[in-house]
Amino acid sequence: MLKHRFRSFLLLLHISVAVMTNAAIMQPNPIISLGNDVEVAVSSGDGSGINDKKFGYYADKRWEITDDSWVAVKVTSGTYSHVFFIWNCPDTSWSDAIGIPEESSCSNGVKIPVDYEILTSANSTDGSDGDWETAVTVEGNTVAARGHMVEFSGASWIKMHITAGTGRIDEIEVFDVTNDHRDTWFFLGSKITALMYKGPKSSGYTQRDKSPPDSNFAKMINNRNPEYFPAVVRGGVFCELTSGDVVRDLSKYLEVAGNMHFWAIELGTYDAWGGGNENAAEFQSNLQIIVDSCRNNGIEPIISRICSTNPQSLNPSWQIHGDFLKAVDDVTEENDLIPGADFYAYFSTTFGKMDLGNDGVLPNNYGDFEMQREWNLKMDTVVYKADPVSVHPVKQVSGTAVGFAVHSENGQLVLTTARTGTVSVFSTDGRCLSRKNLSATGMIRQGYAPGVYVVRFSAPEHTASVKVLHY
């Protein structure tokens, strides 16, 4: 359960309109937990590797979590109104409670911080002393990586205080999101995604004489686009995850990852298992539910094409049925999504087949690296190399920009429109809380409890969605 305590202000998290305008230009959210003037402090143990950009098996220094332990970072000098704070545990699987297949014994013994606070300080000198203000409180956390939006005006230190939990943290990252927070990525997927980000450096792959390079999606994007450094949460569940498992737990995914703008989705291998097409229609329906839920929450979903198998390593031999690939392609085209990485094409090549493990399905350690590279190459082209760097609108329609604004005032959401249409308010788990048809332009007020809402205004040939924090 996530509790927030904020001052009375409206933080505009995401604005998307139905045509490309200046509001759709994605600005960098620079990483500010790296640099010569950055300091790290911990309550006990070794925190020297907490901001070295090394994750999983490449992180040779991991900070040990104990009850009532803390880690603090003094960010690089600057003035920041808001920051995005990400912590990451090295456990291969993201969760033992979200996305786990029903009637499955899949449990990976994930060790994580369970209860914790994120605090800020303007006058601490060493991460321990000074005055601290609680920005975020989390109780009953169930995931091994997570990001939080934090109000940071006047502060210089940020601290994660863990009151209950076990395990280790291998990396903490802090990003300046004063101007934009959309360069944030949640990688959702099955054990294929779990291994892509957190698999071992060596997994029996003998065709090459060294482990894959210590790199990842964020580093690769930064190498090609130095002004950008994506904020990434690694959300692969190390189970035979199907699209139905994700749909069943969508509200849980949204609760902990609904503040990430891009969802890079890898699904389908276990829906298509065995080579038949009997589940293809349900798979496409599930993808559409995921897309609708994402867009109702201001999230831009991007779906990768399913990894091909190596039939020669399978007994009996089978390959992903074309109807599942068509489902991905149709959902992407019909919803005007940014196209995802084409894993089917890559793993169908000679080198790609070598990058699949002995089971003919799961990529080996080089395949894990190549999957991140495929994501990088595709996103570098369709997102970061766009002119200007931009993101797709929530819903692609024709027409001019919509006259629509929303702000928070005295406990009410105040919506101002310049045309007739329909205003819908959604919760972060995709539930429609209210819908009103407006027969005239002007202003309407609706009372809601403090929290995160998605407000969507629809008019003929025009749609706009705004994700807001309301106080």
Image (spheres, rainbow, N blue to C red):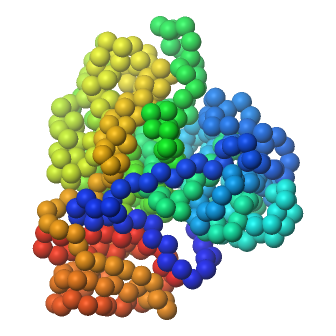
Q: Is residue 361 above or below residue 328?
A: above
Q: Is residue 116 left or right of residue 180?
A: right
Q: Is residue 281 left or right of residue 433?
A: left
Q: Is residue 271 left or right of residue 210?
A: left
Q: Is residue 71 left or right of residue 322?
A: right
- Name the image quarter holding residue 160: bottom right
At x 74%, y 47%, the residue is: 37
- Does any portion of residue 131 appear in the rendered image? yes
At x 28%, y 35%, the residue is: 305
At x 16%, y 51%, the residue is: 334
Could you say where residue 73 lies in the image, as x and y percent from the top left?
73, 53
Could you say where residue 55 lies in the image, as x and y percent from the top left?
62, 36
At x 22%, y 36%, the residue is: 325
Tell me the quarter of the image containing the N terminus.
bottom right
Could you say where residue 173 lies in the image, as x and y percent from the top left?
62, 48
How many marks on residues?
0
- Between 93 and 64, the residue placed more toward the observer is 64
- Name the image quarter holding residue 443: bottom left
Q: Is residue 446 above or below residue 193?
A: below
Q: Is residue 387 above or below residue 3?
A: above
Q: Is residue 337 above or below residue 319?
A: below
- Between 377 and 111, the residue placed more toward the observer is 377
- Does any portion of residue 268 appear in the rendered image? no
- Name the image quarter holding residue 78: bottom right
Could you say where residue 127 lies in the image, as x and y percent from the top left?
81, 57
